[in-house]
């Protein structure tokens, strides 16, 4: 039984059912699709449609008699009886269990984040954010058309968090506002359109080489993004964001890309978790005292170098493949000392905007600018599931590049901000 159809869950399911007929796998997720989260920011910035980054889990299971897809929300697990309870009051049994629920938005206790900020962990959140931003521009254009005084809040976008997601969001909104929305709304004064990126540390893209961090700041500022380093958010309101120094910015759109926390189900189950909600595991990614229960990806506190492995897709994928090997060996009666799980870092990357990305390889080599952007595009096309998705994304990217246009600008109701996706 695999709980979670993210990168780790799908990697485990694929590996478990590839070369054996002994194992039957059930993949449970509260949604009926896998979400390619690295491209959610493009849905939120009108570059792609939600369907381009979602892949049906039943399509993933089609033609594989050993794999079953089940849509359901897990509400409890009885580890002694080896049963899983679902929200519809049904239960399912398991012999081996892989917990791969991923992570949720972390608000770090900042007042107002849950009520007023947008997260970016699901296609629904990305769609809602896109609709909200465009609706704000519509509202302000209507006001200006009636001769009302300009209001900065509707056309100011504040992105909190200077990691890859925050950098990509800020760059995406800078391009969307300058190249698409301002031409669409000639009533608006470009001076009232702002994109602000807020980071609490003294550099963007923590963990990247210093020259890539500096490159990201230069590129974003050249695109018109206001980069605020060493700035802590104290509170998020309905129409403003307040910083620790007492200053504030009027805005109706705050995108919270400041952090991630493990899925709350682990803590609800009474498992041993750290401050970020990650589950304690042994060197085989098993829960202590539960030899047939594994935790992978964002959910697991996996030791790496001087800390813990980052909560990124490659860690989840490698963990899913490792756990699958251990389960297959167990089913086959192989009783040898298995090597501990060791995450292999293949590098990091982030796109900043058109013709601009930063890539850092494990050997210390770095790529930036147009070459880095091409590498970023190619890798994400390869990682996308399904030929239709790849073809649709490629066509959209080509159209955006050639015309500077964004095709996904429809406002989908409702346009209000949904609650942060706190259940994964």
Image: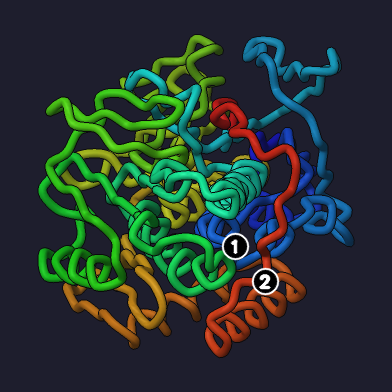
Q: Earlier in the sequence, mark 2 or mark 1?
A: 1
Q: Residue at x 48, y 60 (%)?
A: 188
Percent from the top left, x then y, of residue 120? 52, 44
344, 127: nearer the viewer: 127
Instruction: Determine contact: label 2, label 1, CB under 8 Å.
Output: yes
- Can see residue 9? no
Q: Residue at x 14, y 53 (%)?
A: 203
Percent from the top left, x then y, of residue 386? 73, 69
Q: Residue at x 21, y 77 (%)?
A: 366
> Residue 168 sits in which quadrant?
bottom left
Q: Is 24 on the left or on the right of 401, as rendered?
A: right
Q: Gap in Å between the C-alphas at discs 2 and 1?
A: 7 Å
Q: Which residue is mark 2?
A: 407
Percent from the top left, x then y, of residue 58? 84, 51
Q: Circle 1: is it few (<14), some (14-19), or many (20+) Cα within 10 Å? A: many
259, 290: nearer the viewer: 259
Note whether 220 is above or below 423 in the view shown.
below
- Can see residue 300? yes
> Residue 208 sits in which quadrant?
bottom left
Q: Is 298 on the left or on the right of 383, as rendered?
A: left
Percent from the top left, x then y, of residue 333? 63, 42
Circle 2 sits in a helix, a strand or a loop, which is it? loop
Number of numbered discs visible in the structure rendering: 2
Q: Residue at x 33, y 60 (%)?
A: 191
């Amino acid at each position: 039984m695999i709980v979670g159809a993210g990168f780790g869950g799908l990697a485990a399911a694929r590996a478990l059912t590839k070369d054996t007929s002994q194992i039957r796998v059930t993949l449970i997720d509260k949604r009926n699709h896998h979400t390619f989260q690295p491209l959610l920011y493009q849905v939120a910035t009108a570059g792609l449609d939600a369907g381009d980054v979602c892949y049906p889990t039943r399509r993933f299971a089609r033609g594989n008699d050993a794999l079953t897809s089940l849509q359901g929300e897990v509400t409890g697990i009885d580890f002694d009886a080896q049963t899983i309870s679902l929200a519809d009051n049904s239960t399912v049994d398991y012999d081996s269990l892989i917990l791969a629920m991923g992570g949720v938005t972390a608000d770090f206790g900042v007042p107002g984040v849950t009520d007023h900020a947008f997260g970016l962990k699901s296609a629904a959140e990305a769609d809602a954010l896109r609709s909200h931003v465009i609706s704000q521009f519509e509202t302000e254009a209507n006001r200006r058309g009636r001769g009302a005084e300009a209001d900065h809040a509707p056309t100011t976008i504040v992105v909190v968090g200077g990691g890859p997601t925050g950098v990509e969001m800020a760059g995406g909104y800078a391009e969307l506002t300058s190249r698409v929305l301002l031409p669409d709304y000639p009533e608006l004064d470009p001076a009232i359109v702002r994109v602000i990126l807020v980071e609490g540390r003294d550099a963007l893209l923590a963990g990247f080489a210093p020259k890539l961090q500096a490159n990201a700041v230069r590129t974003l500022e050249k695109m018109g993004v206001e980069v605020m380093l060493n700035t802590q958010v104290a509170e998020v309101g309905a129409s403003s964001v307040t910083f620790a120094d007492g200053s504030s910015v009027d805005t109706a759109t705050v995108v919270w890309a400041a952090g991630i926390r493990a899925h709350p189900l682990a803590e609800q189950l009474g498992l041993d978790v750290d401050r970020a909600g990650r589950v304690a595991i042994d060197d085989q990614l098993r829960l202590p005292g539960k030899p047939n229960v594994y935790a992978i990806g964002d959910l697991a506190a996996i030791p790496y170098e001087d800390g813990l492995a980052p909560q990124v897709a490659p860690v989840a994928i490698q963990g899913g493949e490792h756990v699958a090997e251990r389960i297959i060996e167990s089913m086959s009666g192989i009783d040898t000392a298995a090597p501990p799980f060791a995450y292999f870092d293949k590098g990091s990357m982030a796109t900043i905007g058109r013709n601009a990305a930063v890539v850092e390889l494990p050997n210390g080599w770095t790529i930036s600018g147009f070459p880095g952007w091409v590498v970023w595009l190619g890798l994400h096309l390869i990682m996308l599931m399904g030929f239709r998705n790849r073809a649709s994304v490629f066509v959209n990217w080509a159209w955006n590049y050639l015309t500077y246009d964004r095709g996904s600008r429809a406002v989908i109701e409702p346009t209000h901000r949904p609650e942060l996706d706190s259940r994964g």
